[in-house]
Amino acid sequence: MDTTIPQSAVRTRYRVPYADTDMMGVVYYGNYLTLFERARNELMRATGPSYAQMEREGLMLPVIQAHVDYRSPARYDDELEIAAWLDEARGARCTVRCAVLRDGETLATGWTVHACVDAKTRRPARLPSWLSARHFTPPEGDSRPVS
Amino acid sequence: MDTTIPQSAVRTRYRVPYADTDMMGVVYYGNYLTLFERARNELMRATGPSYAQMEREGLMLPVIQAHVDYRSPARYDDELEIAAWLDEARGARCTVRCAVLRDGETLATGWTVHACVDAKTRRPARLPSWLSARHFTPPEGDSRPVS
Amino acid sequence: MDTTIPQSAVRTRYRVPYADTDMMGVVYYGNYLTLFERARNELMRATGPSYAQMEREGLMLPVIQAHVDYRSPARYDDELEIAAWLDEARGARCTVRCAVLRDGETLATGWTVHACVDAKTRRPARLPSWLSARHFTPPEGDSRPVS
Amino acid sequence: MDTTIPQSAVRTRYRVPYADTDMMGVVYYGNYLTLFERARNELMRATGPSYAQMEREGLMLPVIQAHVDYRSPARYDDELEIAAWLDEARGARCTVRCAVLRDGETLATGWTVHACVDAKTRRPARLPSWLSARHFTPPEGDSRPVS
């Protein structure tokens, strides 16, 4: 459960609506996977074509594994920051790590593993070069620093 | 807010998970539209081809209006009954009415209006005859009566 | 289905994740009620205490009616703007109207009616004066104008 | 990713609504955690007091870890079967394993780890004896066998 967030992480802000909470008064555990998705979307937009663009170009990245470690609950109206960074990418698979933070405190961490597939055939396809680890260039600076 | 449920209504049971609740301790208001959808799916399955089958045959029923009146909250672990019935169907539109009940008490009522469109062109299409009001034949009896 | 958005409307931006879409390729109809909630939260934050603060002070605004008219679908990765404004507020009830826009085009409109209740007893309570129509003062200017 | 489902597993049926799908035409990856919750609820109801009853008695089981391996996608209108079984339970923690099946094919597997906490103080509490592994007695037979 290492939470060292690398410089290459892209950070996304998100305000928690009532919809995300459950009767325990906290964000429902399944909704963290949507937070992770929001952060992945911004990671891709910041480092290459957006995921929407990638799909239009014929590639998809379905999730084949997801993992979350919950430390401290997020709550209604929290302004969260979700950090996402590419951890590994080779062949037809990549791993994105995420951390959910509130005021610098890490609330949850986790990862998703993605297969790269052809959007039409749904068969394995090579990751685009900009997504492969070797070629991964973190965006210079970060316009949305942690508060 | 008339809640007379006609004999033709099809009733679906649903157990409320934690996921559907919010921090007010009740089912989040937006989730009633998913309850309505579950009931519509069973209404169609009981009275004609399933909606899945209808889509495979090239027709879609996107929602163009939704309305819910909330009377009393549904809660975690409630075993709800959702009644759905066809209220009107002509040309390229139909209205489905729904009521959410718990132990015979009406918790919410509402409706959805649907356009019938061609799945490929997304242009208006005539409702299939089995969905038109004239031809609507309620299923004989009801294997899932209200408790 | 009047979509004249008043000057007093507060506008919130929202990027659509994959999570909000359905197999029709568009935002699922029930998720518009979460969009409405996001906009109401920002309306309240901009015009008085936030809803979170209001609950801490002992008042709740459960939804007793919701209505949506869908015109044109929102899609994945759309950057939506949701406008919310107070339409009516007296006694123990208020109505908030919402419009979902993309690049100035109105995709959906609707409203929610809320009862004001005591958070502990859940019995009707007077709306706070800042929420009553007479006292409603639109925020000066709008830092998030429509693009 | 062993999918041997033990005899002690409790199986729950679930029909996939449109709401659960995404624009890839499959069940959104985050929604599997709600499927897991539905199955855990039925596991508890079948083997001891329901989770709702457990909360009323002052204990909560917040999730501290969740993991899902996705093999093959679930789709709209699928009638899924979700198997859940207690894997480990000692002190203040327990692990529940789940498998999502369609017509006997395993679509996804995973687990959740839960902390047992006092509902009021939210501090660690001993698992109730009926939830501890030693005392775990699988229900005799299974009224909902795999099809």
Image: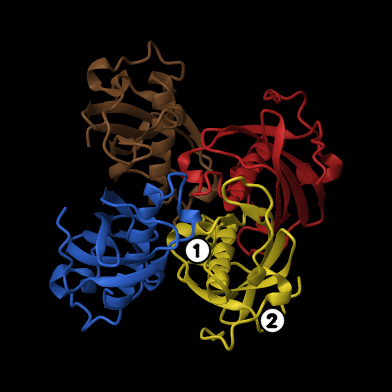
Chain colours: A brown, B yellow, C red, D blue
The kind of residue on which mark 2 rests is Pro
Quadrant into which the N terminus of chain A falls: top left
Q: Do the residues labelled 1 and 2 touch (CB within 8 Å)?
A: no
Q: A91 or B21: nearer the eye? A: A91
Q: Disc 1 designates what residue?
A: B53
Tell me where residue D54 appears, x and y as whole percent: 35, 70
Q: A91 or A12: nearer the eye? A: A91
Does A96 appear above or below A132? Answer: below
- Which of discs 1 and 2 lies nearer the camera? The answer is 1
Whether residue C50 is visible: no
Query: What residue appears at the point 66 percent right and 47 percent down from the top-left corner?
Result: B123
Q: How many marks?
A: 2
Which chain letter goes with mark 1? B
Instruction: Identify the mark nearer the N-term, 1 or 2.
Output: 2
Which chain letter goes with mark 2? B
Does B133 appear above or below D1? Answer: below
Q: Is residue D40 left or right of residue B136?
A: left
Query: What residue appears at the point 29 percent right and 32 percent down from the top-left corner?
Result: A97
Q: In which quarter of the image is residue A113?
A: top left
Asked which secondary structure carries label 1, the reply is helix
Callout 2 crowding tier (Cα within 10 Å): few <14, some 14–19, many ≥20: few
Q: In this view, does A54 lie to the left or right of C25?
A: left
Q: Disc 2 designates what residue?
A: B6
Asked which secondary structure carries label 2, the reply is loop
Do the residues at pointers 1 and 2 share their chain? yes
The kind of residue on which mark 1 rests is Gln
Tell me where residue B84 appears, x and y as whole percent: 62, 72
Query: What residue appears at the point 40 percent right and 60 percent down from the top-left corner?
Result: D120
Tell me where residue B83 appears, x and y as whole percent: 60, 75
Whether residue A3 is visible: yes
